[in-house]
Amino acid sequence: MPATMQAVVKAGREPGAEVREVGVPEIGPQEVLVRVRAASICGTDLHIYNWDRWAQRRLRLPLIFGHEFCGHVEWVGEKVVATKPGDFVSAEMHLACGHCFQCLTGQRHICQNVRIIGIDADGCFAEFVRIPESNIWKIDPAIPMEYGAILDPLGNAVHTVLAGEVAGLSVAVTGAGPVGLFAIAVAKACGGGPVLATEPHPYRQKLAWKMGADAVIDPSSSDPVAEVLRLTQGIGADVVLEMSGNPLGVRQAFQMLRRGGRISLLGIPAKPVELDLANDVIFKGAVVQGINGRRVFDTWYRMQALLKSGALKLGPLITDRMPLSSFEKGIHLLLSGNASKILLYPDGKQ
Ligand code: ZN
């Protein structure tokens, strides 16, 4: 075991981050040390890199960030029971407290005291990451290695799509960022149709088609509500999955929902959003759901089954691969909008 490792460290209270040589984390008795094989950049990492208001309030520095990864277990604590060195794993990076009302009633994904590895504790943009055994997820050998690094956002999509019925129903996905794109693929794999995506960015529109969308609507050149009504015989979408967090996108998402339909919201608006509750929720009899994280581990098991069925082809969403030391190139590529999931390899071998 080396004593030090390369890691992406956010050290200064200003935009940016740097690769540094830091100590390899020490693990506690119920923790596991994982040698990171591949990590993936999330939108959250862009907020951290850019040092926006959310990051300024939330983060304590210095911090190794990153929370999407897969790797091999290198070392286990003395009280670790079911995880062995060599296991190929990912992890649920939301650490639930285990003692609040939600944790005690089977709702760990909305724990009152959640801490997130890569945000509230050192994360996976490093050669090694420390994870409690209770949060380790063993990756089935039938699943392609690279998919292991994107289970966290794919899990967001699986949680959102499967939060209600979807088979034989029309599904509108508003916003084709990575989770929206995953949601298109999951909705198709689960028998949803037509699956209609709205997305203004041309690069993401192309990926939405590749993920199997039956129609991709550009809200900057046509009215997405009118288009969804036209494509659903004037009824509106049975299911709307709001992935954009954009205030106008959120209002349009409610407007394109049919009466009695289900809308599940995952996109996070930066500010409060004004809605026409009377017309778009109450008179409509809409079922409205907030979606946070992944159900632990229900969502993980369903995601694994979907991946093993072969119905999810996610390859086109991994648009770039690079060594961890080039992470800034990846960040800027994502900020340009001309990338979706970017994998970082700490050992440089892709
Ligand atoms: Zn809790």
Image (cartoon, rainbow, N blue to C red):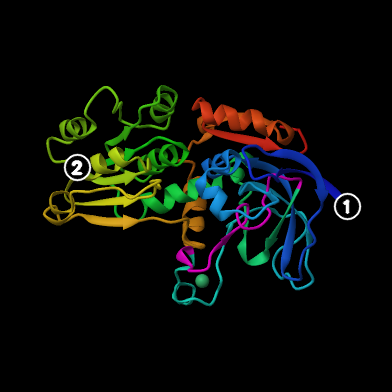
Q: What residue is drawn where x is 79% and y is 41%?
A: 20
- Report the predominant secondary structure element of the magenta stretch: loop
Q: Secondary structure at mark 2?
A: helix
Residue shown at 37% from the left, 36% from the top: 175
Quadrant of the rendering where the C terminus is positioned: top right
User: Is residue 170 at all visible to an observer of this figure?
Assistant: no
Cα distance in 3D space between marks 2 and 1: 56 Å
Q: Which residues are magenta?
A: 109-127
Dot label at residue 255: 2
Residue marked by disc 1 = 3
Mark toward the start of the polypeptide (2 vs 1): 1
Q: Is residue 229 left or right of residue 207?
A: left
Residue 73 in the magenta stretch? The answer is no
On screen, residue 106 versus residue 75, left or right, reads left
Classify residue 122 by image quadrant: bottom right
Rendered position, 203 above or below 36: above
Judging depth in this view, the residue of 324 and 236 nearest the camera is: 324
Q: Is residue 316 above or below residue 190?
A: above
